[in-house]
């Protein structure tokens, strides 16, 4: 019987289960799509029961695909999208699930920005408040749905829901807590003063106990074994924030290494020795006890392509991202191409500064629009990378993962727009691989994440280098992209001010 590791990756839309051998080879993959409920504009919810169903189905299907391989799962690790708000009631029954693309608490963020609370929060948490941040949603719930707030028994993150479902244990890890702005970096723990700044000091007892991502926190229960086909007693580690998991699964674990994840979110992150209080970035997280992750991110990446194909593919254009890449490759770069703002889901832009094509003419084709979309997504990544560099965080190249990494043209476009060499991961399931590496460390297969990564992660042997003529082409278009963003934001602000008067 061959030993293997199970990595589970729970995003906002999809739950994946992946079996890996101890050399990092994918043995089987299964996924279960979830449904986002939108009871009101700006709301994005997913019942915990949907996660239970998705995990059960994905694991069972994954194991069924590999049934002939006679495998023994020796440990389980889960990664999940950060922030949002998943909660059990006081009897540990499912209570609510709010996803990280939710926007209901935007006004609460604005209030903190006006009274200076956001700066005080950053000084303790190294996290800027934003609408779907877990403590912001807790604060919103306390103000607007007090009856639900009073029912809260345990506040969890997406991957903690999976750990609880499989093991019955309530647990959390440092990477998720840090990424949600719940960790006080001075003592690497929860903090009553920080919670008070969010106006949720009474919620401190609701937060899960903190563990290192690779720490075993429980084992598969008999009930979960019957549902999933896993063996009762199989060790389960605390798990990891999916942003950090994708970096680990891409081989990015050492100081100065950079990871770009182009999926639903535009994730741009660099491993650092310690966070910088004086030069803020959007988010900081923990990768291991002695290393941290400086992160700039927003919901502005490859999900834009999913939307475009879902809404505008009439059947003539072919199949998904692969065919779209071929179409984009057919476009000759020229200054008459439109500009695209990829703010379909981003909660960091407002009003008319949401998504849009600019400069469209009657002569433009679907291919031209797709080219602009591919380019606009990378421009959003570049804006984040510019902020990382402005904070003094230096790096010479980056490793690309996520949906865009599977395209035949997008990775080279990243190199051409960002002006740095881009490596591409060989494994498509980097989030699940990162979780599986955590599981392997937890049961002693590897001594730490760096050792595990060195054993199982492979990237393209030669990086994609920026092409000078394309770098020169994209540069003025990026400046126009940024100017349009400012103009549209100013228009919206002026309209809001006019409405108030």
Image (cartoon, rainbow, N blue to C red):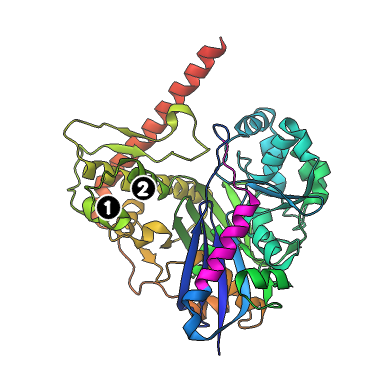
Q: Residues within 10 Å of mark 1 (few under 14, many from 20)?
A: many
- Mark 1 element type: helix
Whether residue 433 is visible here, answered yes or no, is no
- Mark 2 element type: helix
In the rendered structure, find residue 305 and report the number of the disc placed on it: 2
Residue 490 is left or right of residue 37, and the answer is left
- For the C terminus, the quadrant is top right
> For the magenta stretch, what is the residue range?
43-62
Give the vertical position of 35 relative to 30 (above or below).
above
From the viewer's side, name the closer residue of 16 and 395: 16
Residue at the image point whose x is 50% and y is 22% from the top: 493
Give the vertical position of 98 relative to 189 (above or below).
above
Q: Residues within 10 Å of mark 2 (few under 14, many from 20)?
A: many
From the viewer's side, name the closer residue of 43 and 119: 43
What residue is shown with label 1?
Answer: 324
- Please state the horizontal and vertical placement of residue 152, each as a whole percent of the image: 78, 45
Residue 44 is left or right of residue 483, and the answer is right
Residue at the image point whose x is 73% and y is 33% from the top: 145
Q: Quadrant of residue 419?
A: bottom left
- Please state the horizontal and vertical placement of residue 91, each as a whole percent of the image: 81, 53
Check the image and name the residue furthest to the bottom: 1
Whether residue 47 is visible here, answered yes or no, is yes
Residue at the image point whose x is 53% and y is 45% from the top: 36
Check the image and name the residue furthest to the front: 226
- Please state the horizontal and vertical placement of residue 398, each as a whole percent of the image: 42, 62
Disc 2 versus disc 1: distance between alpha carbons? 9 Å
Q: Does the magenta run of residues contain 87?
A: no
The reply to whether dot 2 and dot 1 touch (C-beta < 8 Å) is yes
Residue at the image point whose x is 69% and y is 54% from the top: 177
* Magenta segment main secondary structure: helix
Q: Quadrant of residue 79?
A: bottom right
In the rendered structure, find residue 131 and report the number of the disc placed on it: none
């Amino acid at each position: 019987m061959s030993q293997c590791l199970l990595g589970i990756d729970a995003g906002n839309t999809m739950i994946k289960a992946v079996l890996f051998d101890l050399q990092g080879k994918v043995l089987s993959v299964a996924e279960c799509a979830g449904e986002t409920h939108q009871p009101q504009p700006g709301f994005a919810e997913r019942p915990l029961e949907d996660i239970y169903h998705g995990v059960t189905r994905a694991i069972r299907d994954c194991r069924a695909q590999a049934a002939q391989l006679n495998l023994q799962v020796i440990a389980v690790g889960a990664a999940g999208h950060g922030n949002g708000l998943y909660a059990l009631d006081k009897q540990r029954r499912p209570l609510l699930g709010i996803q990280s693309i939710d926007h209901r608490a935007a006004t609460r963020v604005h209030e903190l920005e006006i009274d200076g609370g956001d700066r005080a929060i950053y000084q303790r948490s190294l996290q800027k408040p934003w609408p779907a941040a877990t403590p912001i949603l807790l604060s919103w719930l306390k103000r607007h749905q007090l009856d639900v707030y009073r029912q809260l028994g345990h506040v969890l993150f997406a991957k903690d829901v999976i750990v609880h479902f499989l093991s019955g244990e309530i647990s959390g890890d440092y990477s998720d807590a840090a990424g949600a702005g719940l960790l006080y970096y001075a003592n690497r723990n929860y903090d009553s003063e920080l919670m008070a700044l969010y106006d949720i000091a009474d919620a401190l007892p609701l937060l899960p106990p903190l563990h290192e991502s690779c720490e075993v926190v429980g084992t598969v229960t008999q009930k979960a074994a019957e549902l999933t086909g896993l063996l009762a007693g199989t060790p389960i580690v605390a798990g990891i924030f999916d942003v950090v998991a994708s970096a680990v699964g891409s081989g990015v674990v050492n100081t100065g290494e950079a990871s770009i994840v182009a999926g639903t979110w535009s994730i741009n992150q660099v491993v650092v020795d310690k966070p910088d209080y004086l030069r803020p970035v959007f988010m900081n997280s923990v990768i291991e006890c002695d290393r941290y992750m400086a992160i700039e991110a927003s919901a502005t990446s490859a999900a834009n392509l999913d939307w475009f194909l879902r809404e505008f593919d009439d059947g003539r254009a072919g199949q998904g991202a692969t065919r779209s890449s071929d179409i984009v490759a057919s476009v000759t770069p020229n200054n008459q191409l439109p500009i695209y703002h990829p703010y379909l889901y981003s909660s960091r832009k407002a009003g008319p500064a949401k998504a849009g094509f600019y400069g469209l003419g009657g002569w433009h084709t679907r291919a031209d629009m797709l080219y602009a979309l591919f380019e606009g997504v990378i421009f959003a990544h570049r804006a984040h990378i510019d902020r990382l560099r402005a904070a003094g965080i230096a790096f010479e190249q980056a490793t690309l993962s996520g949906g865009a990494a599977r395209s035949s043209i997008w990775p080279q476009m990243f190199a051409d727009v960002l002006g740095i060499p881009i490596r591409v991961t060989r494994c498509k399931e980097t989030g699940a691989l990162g979780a599986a590496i955590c599981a392997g460390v937890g049961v002693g297969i590897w001594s730490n994440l760096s050792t595990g990564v060195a054993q199982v992660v492979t990237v393209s042997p030669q990086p994609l280098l920026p092409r000078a003529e394309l770098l020169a082409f994209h540069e003025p278009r990026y400046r126009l992209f940024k100017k349009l963003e400012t103009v549209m934001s100013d228009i919206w602000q002026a309209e809001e001010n006019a409405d108030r008067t």
